[in-house]
Image: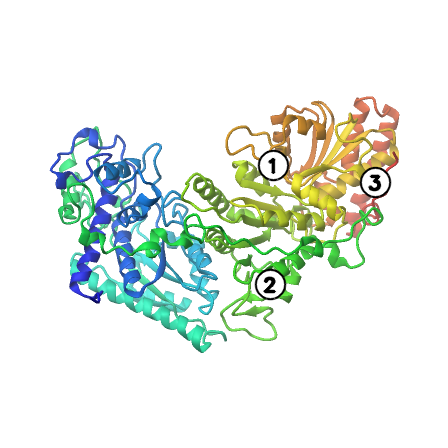
Amino acid sequence: MAVDYDSKEYLEKVDAWWRASTYLSGGMIFLKNNPLFSVTKTPIKASDIKVKPIGHWGTISGQTFLYAHANRLINKYGLNMFYIGGPGHGGQVMVTNAYLDGSYTEDYPEITQDLEGMSRLYKRFSFPGGIGSHMTAQTPGSLHEGGELGYSLSHATGAVLDNPDQIAFTVVGDGEAETGPAMTAWHSIKFLNPKNDGAVLPTLDLNGFKISNPTIFSRMSDVEITKFFEGLGYSPRFLENNEIHDFETYHEKAAKIYDRAIEDIKDIQSDARDKGRYQDGEVPAWPVIIARLPKGWGGPTHNPAGEPIENSFRAHQVPLGLSQKNLDELPEFEAWMNSYKPEELFNTDGSLKKEVADFAPKGDKRMAMNPVANGGRARGEKPELLDLPDWKDFSNDVNAENRGTTFADQNRNMDMNVLSGYLAKLSQKNPKSFRFFGPDETMSNRLWEMFKVTNRQWMEEIKEPNDQHEAPEGRILDAQLSEHQAEGWLEAYTLTGRTGIFASYESFLRVVDSMITQHFKWIRQASVEDWRNDYPSLNLISTSTVFQQDHNGYTHQDPGLLTHLAEKKSDFVRQYLPADGNTLLAVFDRAFTERQKINHIVASKQPRQQWFSVDEAEELATTGLKTIDWASTVAEGDKADIVFASAGVEPTIETLAAIDLINEAFPQVKFRYVNVVELDRLQKKNGPLNAERSLTDDEFTKFFGESGTPVLFGFHGYEDLIESMFYERGHLGLHVHGYREDGDITTAYDMRVYSELDRFHQAKDAVSVLTSEGVVSDADGKAFDKKMDDILAKHFDVTRNEGRDIEEFTNWKWTALKK
């Protein structure tokens, strides 16, 4: 018999599902046992109640209402749909719905669909050793936690890119909507191509209040909101709350509004896919639903002082004072729970009544089991890996004859441009599973070869000849000047099983370091859930780096993301500082094969000397660091008077130039040079999730000598990061030259002198140490020091008076060592 999804009888099923999920969602805040007290006729005892109820109620009933209607849409239209909950701390919405449709039990067999399993579910919510109040990685169906507000739309968009049959049912909180990233993300429709991508169906959940303030959108009239969204290009529709307690009428209104939205989406996609529409600058008017759903809807109405709870900010967190040690409001709690008529929903054994259970979508149509929310594939299915080109086909021919020089073709000296050839081929070989993201910087960051094979995806009008590389179809998404948007798109693209890169100016990648942190937390939590599939790694490029920002000045100089990520569990983080084009290529070849990591790669875009052969680059990328024989006078593991080391492009140039100065002046000095590419290999962090790549103490000593051996380290970032790593190792001979929080608009070399990263300061420091150790005489040390000071004085005079760099820098080339 055909199902009438619009009938009163079917809408009663929607209502029953809503009541069931809302009942569980409210009850689990307070109870750890006896979840169906009124159904089983078992009075609530103090021991059934949590000592400290924790959770949030304010957005729950509105979201469970929306989730129930999303289930109806799936059943009526046969949709592949997943849920993104933007309002913070709405975790029980997805938990309870997954429990009701059976998904939760499939992933957690101990959470059975009976009284015992329901009690376990209640106890674990916001409880020590249990699950949090967000839609975390522990929640089936979740790919967006909701705890860090502002990113629901960006994540929804990233998830449906190259997923043409998926719809992201996205609930945007009205507090969330006030954040900068969320306001930015409304522009996402200018980048979604209905021909090849899926759709986002956003609902702005106007519940009226934040933690203790009204929300801005909720105080706007329908006319004002209509103008706002129509100005952005949407087609807004309203679900009003003036008849909110007329459940039958409200379900009918919601069903009609969402039916129309789905039919409009299908029409847009059909026009694009079958008729070629929306490929010439016309952006479709995607639907957006504005749902006025009161905060705390259907919950306690007033507190003991007579102040309103429902439809006020007081509903935000725990709406009653009930706890194990305070039973005063137990009658109010029981009345609230009983208002959902649980006896109509659940059997006395705790199972869901058949007529209610039958409403759930089946199999992978359940939003909690949609493969898109679990690494883009079914439970246990192997991932589809990138088809990688051979990076060596794009490498530079670096050898003993040309090492440390620049190539005649200046493009071959720009590491990012060398990389761009590889990425262009990668894009061609993976036309539906690789994308490049950024905030209007891809061209600036020298990824020129990519533009020869793909365009920026851009759905707005294209105005020739001033617009460049804009098209409705393209593998580059960088036409919106927002780090938050680019990072959000990449995170969701990655969490749905595809691979991308986000490149940003180094200092402004810090705009999203909290987002990167939340992604780290996600993959760390997901890694311990057996039912979770793994994910491709999140790939970040810091370019236009601190020591290249001579022209943009002090505001553009900040390498602090290195320190920020070094503080995380290192088994989930890889930080690479390749010193040239070949090593950058080799690093990416490795990064693309590793799973469930954050790969942070610091790369140069300016013309620089090239250092390492293909074989050397491959070893550096694989092992993370290497003793460089051609820049050392003693072998790895042998005793050295001093060890030189560097990590990063400019530090490597300056450290090698300092070695050149020392070797020329004092050929008797025994030294070793170590190039460090994978920074976290230096860390010594014991314990689970911290030891996967750390060097052993013996390996560390092989490179850097026993404690007390002088180590002069040129570093791209803040010096205390390297100092902390050597301190962990108990190595007391370190002298770091890194970024010292000094800068300006100046010459390229003067940027290095500001922080004393330059070769002359490094050489002075090295000779000072060697003099104190008796390797260099006092007289020779003083003479060398005077020579360096004279060059630095010349540098200051020339830069300040002529605005250029001195020849000792511009004309320097690497020369073979005197051994």
- Work out whether mark 2 precedes mark 1 in sequence or the reverse, and give the earlier one: 2
Is 437 or 504 nearer to us in this picture? 437
Q: Are marks 2 and 3 in contact (CB under 8 Å)?
A: no
For the residues carrying marks 1 and 3, which lies nearer the camera in this image? 1
Q: Position of residue 3 (x, y in %)?
A: 21, 65
Badge 1: residue crowd in 10 Å (few <14, some 14–19, many ≥20)? many
Q: Would you name the residue on which mark 1 appears?
A: 680
Residue at x 52%, y 28% (from the top left corner): 687
How far is mark 1 from mark 3, CA to CA? Answer: 35 Å
Q: Are marks 1 and 3 in contact (CB under 8 Å)?
A: no
Q: Would you name the residue on which mark 2 appears?
A: 428
Image mark for residue 627: none
Would residue 342 appear left or right of 811 to someone viewing this image?
A: left
- Work out whether mark 2 precedes mark 3 in sequence or the reverse, and give the earlier one: 2
Is 754 or 625 nearer to us in this picture? 625
**Secondary structure beneath disc 1?**
helix
Q: Amino acid at mark 3?
A: Ile
Q: Would you name the residue on which mark 3 appears?
A: 791
Residue at x 13%, y 35% (from the top left corner): 42
Whether residue 85 appears in this view of the structure is: no
